Image: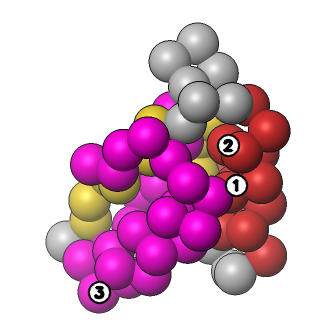
Amino acid sequence: MTKTVTGDFGSKAAMANAMDDLLSSGYPREKVFMDTEHMQLKVITADVTEREVHEILMRHKPTGVH
C-alpha cells in the first residue's frame, strides 16, 4: 500500500535540500513533489519505506511532517 508523506518547510532552500537528499537516496523523481506555494514537499512511498522518508525529511528541519 502507498502513502503520501508531507513535510512542511519554512524555506525553499531547506525544501530543495530535502528533495535532493531523497533523490540521492534512490527515491524516484516522479514520486517526489515540491509545492512551493504551500512550502510542502510530498513523497509518495510504500508503507515499508515511510519511516526512511520521515527520517530523511527530519534531517532538514521541517516545521512538521504528516
1 vs 2, front mark: 2
The foreground one among 45 and 54 is 54
Badge 3 crowding class, 10 Å Cα cut-off, few under 14, some 14 to 19, many 20 or more, is few
Q: Is residue 16 magenta?
A: no
Residue linked to disc 1: 19
Q: Tell me the CA gap for discs 2 and 3.
A: 23 Å
Is residue 31 visible from the viewing direction of this image?
Answer: no
| Relative horizontal placement of residue 44, taking residue 25 as reference (left or right) | left
Amino acid type, label 2: Met
Q: Residue at x 35, y 50 (%)?
A: 65
**Dot 1 lies on which element?**
helix
Provide the residue designation for mark 3. Answer: 48
Residue 61 seen in this snapshot: yes
Q: Position of residue 46 (x, y in %)?
A: 32, 74
Q: Residue 3, position in %: x, y? A: 26, 59
Q: Secondary structure at mark 3?
A: helix
Q: Which residue is mark 2?
A: 15
Q: Considering the numbered disc 2 on the image, is that residue within a helix, a strand or a loop? A: helix
Write the residue at 69% across / 80% down: 26
Residue type, label 1? Met
26 displayed left or right of 10: right
Who comes first in sequence, dot 2 or dot 3? 2
Q: Amino acid at mark 3?
A: Val
Q: Are marks 1 and 2 in contact (CB under 8 Å)?
A: yes
User: Which mark's residue is nearer the viewer, 1 or 3?
Assistant: 1
Q: Percent x, y for residue 24?
A: 79, 76
Q: Is residue 42 magenta?
A: yes
The 10 Å Cα crowd at callout 1, few under 14, some 14 to 19, many 20 or more, is: many
Q: Which residues are magenta?
A: 40-66
Task: Give the residue at the far left of this rendering.
Answer: 1
